[in-house]
Image (cartoon, grey):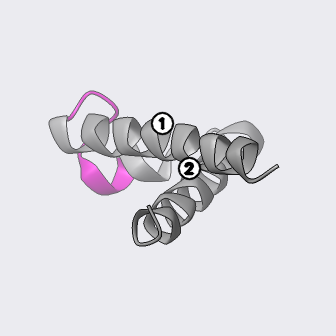
Amino acid sequence: MKKLYPIAFALVLIGALNWGLVGFFKFDLVAALFGGAEALLSRIIYALVGLSGLIVIYKELVKK
């Protein structure tokens, strides 16, 4: 878990930045870089960001 957490945290930051861009500017950076929101690579990144969020939440709950 010690090696996985920094990667998960970085992916959560990427997801947060992407959602910020979507919310403020209607621009999905992941979709723009990887061939659209329905592209396989984009969907994999979205899934990894979601799993990373769960890892970060779990780590924060266990830490307390």
> What residue type is disc 2 on?
Gly
Residue 4 % position (x, y)? 41, 63
Residue 29 % position (x, y)? 47, 53
Which residue is drawn at the image coordinates 47% and 70% (left, top)? 2
Which residue is drawn at the image coordinates 57% and 53% (left, top)? 12
Position above or below: 18 against 38? below
Q: Position of 16 compared to 55: left or right?
A: right
Q: Mark 1 points at which residue?
A: 50
User: Mark 2–mark 1 contact, CB under 8 Å?
Assistant: yes
Of the numbered discs in the image, which one, if any, rests on residue 15?
Answer: 2
User: Which image quadrant is residue 7 in?
Assistant: bottom left
Q: Can residue 59 be seen in this view?
A: yes
Of marks 2 and 1, the one in the foreground: 1
Start and end of the magenta stretch? 32-39
Which residue is drawn at the image coordinates 48% and 58% (left, top)? 8
Most frequent secondary structure within the magenta stretch: loop
Considering every residue shown, the one lying at the far right of the view is 64
Residue 38 % position (x, y)? 26, 27
Q: Can residue 19 be seen in this view?
A: no
Report crowding for label 1: few under 14, some 14 to 19, many 20 or more residues within 10 A (C-alpha).
Answer: some
Instruction: State the separation of the CA atoms marked 2 and 1.
Output: 8 Å
Q: Position of 23 compared to 26: left or right?
A: right
Q: Which of 27 and 55 is in front in this view?
A: 55
Q: Which of marks 2 and 1 is nearer the N terminus?
A: 2
Which residue is drawn at the image coordinates 57% and 62% (left, top)? 9
On the rendered image, what quadrant is the N terminus found in?
Answer: bottom left
> What residue type is disc 1 on?
Gly
Q: Which of 39 and 55 is in front in this view?
A: 55
Position above or below: 60 against 44? below
User: Which image quadrant is residue 27 in?
Assistant: top right
Residue 28 % position (x, y)? 51, 44
Q: Position of 53 compared to 36: left or right?
A: right
